[in-house]
Structure formats: structure tokens, C-alpha cells
Image: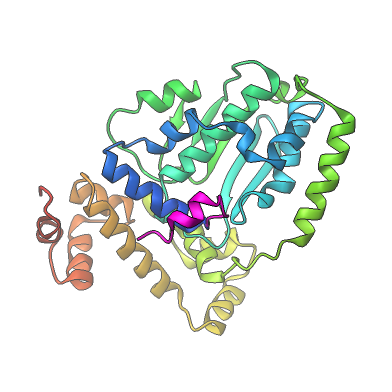
């Protein structure tokens, strides 16, 4: 159902990110573990990151290790992007290219905790971020993730990111080895050069730009175009060249998210807000247009409580 086969798993073949996301969603439902990404990340053997682990572990300082990850992450994950910004806080953001972010929750949490565990392993200290944030919503008891990250964690944010005190980046890596690092960098450069990225579809890029804006009521073409570094006119032309319109993408994204939220224990008013509707009635009208049913009727058809 999620594009995985027992043969691929047994042979440890590369699994597409979209299949990983779908798989974790299904495992979460089957095991009733609402924090399956954190469960897996807490028990993951970091050495399984392969080249990424060793190029980071042989770096001289933590900041150098993260720079290596920023450049070479595509070696292990073709759709994951790590971006580093230095300022009052050292900001490490995680995003996808070519993969709809709105489909994900568990994978994003898995990756963020994995990155934090790696940082802690490299310096041999339980460093804690200043803050962490995720684009997707969460409700209920959040003490587990607050404890694991050791910092305030915000949901329904604009970015998936970890923020660190810049001084932390100067901590030496316990296993620093300049000779091994030179070898690993060379191997990673060769691996990056050999990869061909076919995942940068423009529609998905636009969807990923819209999703974090929805709860804030800012999902407008002008705002998205600005975020993508395009003029509103150029943005519209680019969409038209692919037979798309901003309104169509926005409506489809809302429909996909509504289906997911209605399958969860979220109230109709909360869903309306998450999707950027000013009133619950507007969401109910849209739901009837998408499904032919009201939110309550649709949820009952799924066998869920209203």
C-alpha cells in the first residue's frame, strides 16, 4: 500500500521519501503510536546513516559537521534539504523538495530528533536547542517531545527547524579525524555528483510553500510568490505554463488536508482554522463540495466519532 516490498526491505534498497512517509503513517495507525517517528528516532543506530555519519563524525567542530550534512544530505535522502542560517541563533531548517510536506508528520519528527541525537553523539554532551518547530499541527499531551528535545516545541509553525545557541557550534567533535574527513568529503562529493535529482516538480514546491501559511490566513498567491523569490506575474506565468492555477492548487491542498484531519480526532472548527477558512461554515460548504457530505457526515462514514 505504501510502495514498499519485502524484497526491497530485505535488500536494504533505497526507499523513496514519499513511501517512507506513507509507511510511518500506516505504522502509526496500526500500532496506535501517535509518536512513532520519535519512537524510531530514539532507537535508531546512527551509524546506519553511512557516509553522512562518518563525514560528520570526523569533522573538527559541530558547526563543521552540520555544514557537511547541509551539503551532502542528498546522498542519503534525495528529497531532504538541510539549510543553515547564522544569526542571533544558529538555525537549522529541514524541508523537502518534490515531496508534499502536508502529507507528513511522523517523518519530520523522526528526522529532527535524529539530527539532534547525532549532534549529541558527536560532541558527547546532551546539548539542547533553544527551540524547535514543526509545520504540522499537534494536539493532546506533548510532554514526550518536549522531554526528548529538551526545549520548547512549537507546532503549526512556518518552518521545520531547530535553533541552537551559536556557541554550541564551536564544541569540538569527539572523534575528529582530519585525514578520515578528507577521504569522506571526497567520497561524498563523488556521490553527490553522481546523483540526478528528478524531484523538483513546481506544483509540489508551491504546495510546500502554501501549507505553513494556511493556519495563519496568509495563503495568498502574492505571499507564496514572494517566498519563492518570484514576482506575482512570473509566478502566475510559471503555473500557467504547467497548466496550473494557484486557486486549483490551494483547493486541492485543502481537500487533501481536510481528509487527513477528519480521519483524526480534530473538531470541525479546528480543521477550519488549520485550513485557513475564516468561518466554520465556509469549511462545511467546501467539504460538501469535495465529498458531497458535511464534515460530521464524512467523519461518520469513516467510522469515527463526530
User: What's the coloring here?
Assistant: rainbow
Q: Please report the residue visible at 59 percent of the width from the left and 17 percent of the height from the top.
A: 126
Q: In this view, does 172 lie above or below 306?
A: above
Residue 212 in view, yes or no = no
Give the dominant element type of the magenta stretch: helix, strand or loop.
loop
Question: Please, is residue 37 above or below residue 14 in the view?
Answer: above
Quadrant for the N terminus, please. bottom left
Q: Which percent across, then down, holds residue 149?
A: 49, 25
Residue stretch in magenta: 1-15
Determine whether, in the image, residue 9 is placed left or right of residue 139. right
Q: In the displayed structure, does residue 166 sit left or right of residue 286?
A: right
Toward the viewer: 179 or 285? Answer: 179
Residue 225 location, quadrant: bottom right
Q: Which residue is drawn at the image coordinates 78% and 26% (left, top)?
A: 61
Along the line of sight, the residue nearer the viewer: 304 or 193: 193
Measuring 30% from the left and 65% from the top, which residue is drawn there? 255
Residue 81 percent location from the top left of the image: 63, 50
Q: Left or right: where does residue 226 sit relative to residue 38? A: right
63 left or right, relative to 154:
right
Asked whether 44 or 36 is in front, the reply is 44
- Counting every numbered tag in the picture gives 0
Q: Which residue is drawn at 17% across and 60% down?
A: 281
Q: Residue 306: x, y in percent?
A: 10, 49
Residue 54, image x and y in percent?
A: 74, 35
Q: Can residue 11 be seen in this view?
A: yes
Specify whether residue 122 is painted magenta.
no
Amino acid at each position: 500500500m505504501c510502495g514498499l516490498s519485502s524484497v526491497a526491505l530485505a535488500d536494504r534498497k533505497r526507499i523513496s521519501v514519499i513511501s517512507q512517509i506513507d509507511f510511518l503513517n500506516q505504522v502509526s495507525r496500526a500500532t496506535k503510536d501517535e509518536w512513532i517517528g520519535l519512537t524510531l528516532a530514539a532507537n535508531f543506530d546512527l551509524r546506519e546513516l553511512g557516509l553522512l555519519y562518518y563525514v560528520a563524525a570526523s569533522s573538527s567542530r559541530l558547526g563543521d559537521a552540520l555544514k557537511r550534512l547541509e551539503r551532502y544530505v542528498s546522498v542519503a535522502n534525495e528529497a531532504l534539504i538541510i539549510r543553515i542560517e547564522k544569526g542571533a541563533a544558529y538555525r537549522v531548517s529541514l524541508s523537502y523538495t518534490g515531496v508534499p510536506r502536508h502529507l507528513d508528520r511522523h517523518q519530520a519528527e523522526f528526522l529532527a530528533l535524529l539530527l539532534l541525537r547525532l549532534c549529541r553523539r558527536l560532541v558527547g554532551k546532551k546539548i539542547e536547542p533553544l527551540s524547535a518547530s514543526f509545520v504540522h499541527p499537534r494536539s493532546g499531551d506533548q510532554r514526550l517531545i518536549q522531554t526528548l528535545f529538551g526545549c520548547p516545541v512549537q507546532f503549526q509553525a512556518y518552518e521545520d527547524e531547530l535553533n541552537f545557541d551559536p556557541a554550541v557550534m564551536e564544541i569540538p567533535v569527539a572523534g575528529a579525524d582530519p585525514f578520515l574527513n578528507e577521504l569522506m568529503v571526497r567520497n561524498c562529493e563523488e556521490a553527490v555528483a553522481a546523483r540526478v535529482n528528478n524531484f523538483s516538480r513546481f506544483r509540489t514546491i508551491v504546495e510546500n510553500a502554501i501549507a505553513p501559511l494556511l493556519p495563519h490566513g496568509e495563503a495568498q498567491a502574492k505571499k507564496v510568490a514572494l517566498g519563492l523569490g518570484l514576482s506575482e506575474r512570473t509566478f502566475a506565468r510559471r503555473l500557467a505554463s504547467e497548466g496550473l492555477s494557484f486557486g486549483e492548487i490551494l483547493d486541492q491542498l485543502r481537500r487533501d488536508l481536510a481528509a487527513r484531519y477528519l480521519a483524526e480526532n480534530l473538531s470541525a472548527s479546528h480543521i477550519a482554522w488549520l485550513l485557513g477558512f475564516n468561518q466554520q461554515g465556509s469549511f462545511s460548504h467546501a467539504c460538501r463540495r469535495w465529498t458531497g457530505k458535511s464534515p460530521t457526515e464524512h467523519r461518520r462514514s469513516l467510522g469515527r466519532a463526530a
